[in-house]
Amino acid sequence: MFAINQLPDPTVVSYAKKYRHIAPEVILKEDVLRLGMSFSRDALEFARGCRSQAYFLFSYNISPHDQLGPALSSQAPEDIKLVGGPMALERTSVRVVLSTRSPYLVDIIGGKPMLCENAVPLTEVVLPQKPPYYGATLADGTRYEQVIPLLYDHFAFITTFRVCHYWGDKEECKFCDINHHVRELRRQTGDHVAADAVKDIAKVAEVIEAMTREQSPDFRVITIIMTSGSIVRKVRGGADNAADFNIPYVEAIRSRIGGRLPIVMITESQPIERVKALRAAGISSHNANLEVWDKRLFEIIAPGKAKYVGYEAWLHNLYAAVDVMGEGNVSPNMVSGVEMVQPWGFPTVAEALRSAREGFETLMSHGVVPHLDTWCIEPGSRLDGHPPVPLDFLILADVAWYESWRKYNLPPFIGYGPMGVRGVAVYGNSASVDVSE
């Protein structure tokens, strides 16, 4: 099926022999997401001037900033594309997860950046270029990219509220480093997103208008993703919930750019009346991230969500939201791999996969199309130091997601680009979008 017999056996090759029905793009992408990558000094110099790490929400890295060092921390690209190489990979978008301990290294070989595993070249790396408006400034000197970064060349990502009200061991999601990371970001230098707790609405509207005027197919915005940390009390004397807090941003954006582009809103679960208000304001998709299907794990791993909303109410709100938003427009995130978190999670791949598949089947049978993010074990989270999730689980969970999606004949989750065909996906946080027949 794939030309692998003449190659040595890095992970992607050995797993492609094990799972001959699964594309190597899926295997390599998941292994890189779970183990991270690093960049040689030559590769960092080659990447100078590329669209670099924005640190727009979480660190999305396995190694802490101090361990990475200032060059790698500030100069590494936000995301990359893998293409070609000995296995003739189709174009595959991948989020850059930095780890100094990873066997994966981007190095310069034959004048080109190549992804290597333990010094074995696997595939060429295409680095992201800065769009023309990067470097433009607002009246106060703030650069556009510090307000809204571009991800995967086509996603405008707006973090309206930079911290989360779920606080401490009894509320914070155990896999999440959002509050820790904003403190770390304030110590860093580089072309990062500003660490302001609350984004200025006028600045957001001005920058998004400039971004959406760019018509080059290389940088054309295809979706706007908005998120904030969970809000359960008043923010600066104003709204005490995520819907009321974010609606003014949505209205300001729609007044500038109209209704052509989808706006994806990610918040904690909202009562149906607030979902209706978001829809009326111009939201195209509402994603209340469930994180994990198993109820017991949900209550352990996401204690704030369990405390303020509860598992059953979260599911009820997701199902009800489909009637308001439509199929494909309700897409909670699932942290793929957290099913195997220890000491609480499932001890075997088979048991964890059974639970994940049950979740996909149940959600999709209600018209909810969950999307996966491969678990990045971040140093500022409460699960810092947890061993990597078995690659087998991540691969098989991607396939299980795809099979359920096809079974229920659902549309793609809106705003994240195409999926279901090798070489076309834009989304880089999971290889579920790269699975195909």
Image: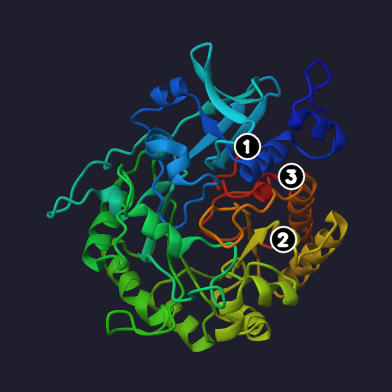
Q: Quadrant of the C terminus?
A: top right
Q: How many marks?
A: 3
Q: In the rendered image, which residue does mark 3 sit on? A: 436
Reading the chain from its start, which is encountered first: label 1 or label 3? 1
Is 353 positioned to the left or the right of 117 in the image?
right
Is 181 positioned to the left or the right of 435 in the image?
left
Asked whether 265 or 194 is in front, the reply is 194
Query: Where is residue 344 drawn, in percent x and y?
Result: 75, 67
Asked whether 321 or 71 is in front, the reply is 71
Q: Secondary structure at mark 2?
A: loop
Query: Where is residue 351 drawn, in percent x and y?
Result: 86, 62
Residue kind at label 3, given as amino acid type: Ser
Residue under the point 64% across and 20% down: 119
Is 238 positioned to the left or the right of 141 in the image?
right
Q: Is residue 129 visible?
A: yes
Residue kind at label 2, given as amino acid type: Val
Cα–Cα gap, marks 3 and 2: 28 Å
Residue under the point 29% across and 84% down: 238
Q: In the rendered image, which residue does mark 2 sit on? A: 341
Residue kind at label 1, given as amino acid type: Gly
Reading the chain from its start, which is encountered first: label 2 or label 1? 2
Reading the chain from its start, which is encountered first: label 3 or label 2? 2
Cα–Cα gap, marks 1 and 3: 10 Å
Q: Secondary structure at mark 3?
A: loop
Query: Where is residue 383 drawn, in percent x and y?
Result: 61, 59
Q: Quadrant of the N terminus?
A: top right
Cα–Cα gap, marks 2 and 1: 31 Å
Would you identify the image quadrant in which residue 199 lies? bottom left
Mark 3: few, some, or many residues within 10 Å (few <14, many ≥20)? Answer: some
Tell which tag, 3 or 2, sits nearer the viewer. Answer: 2
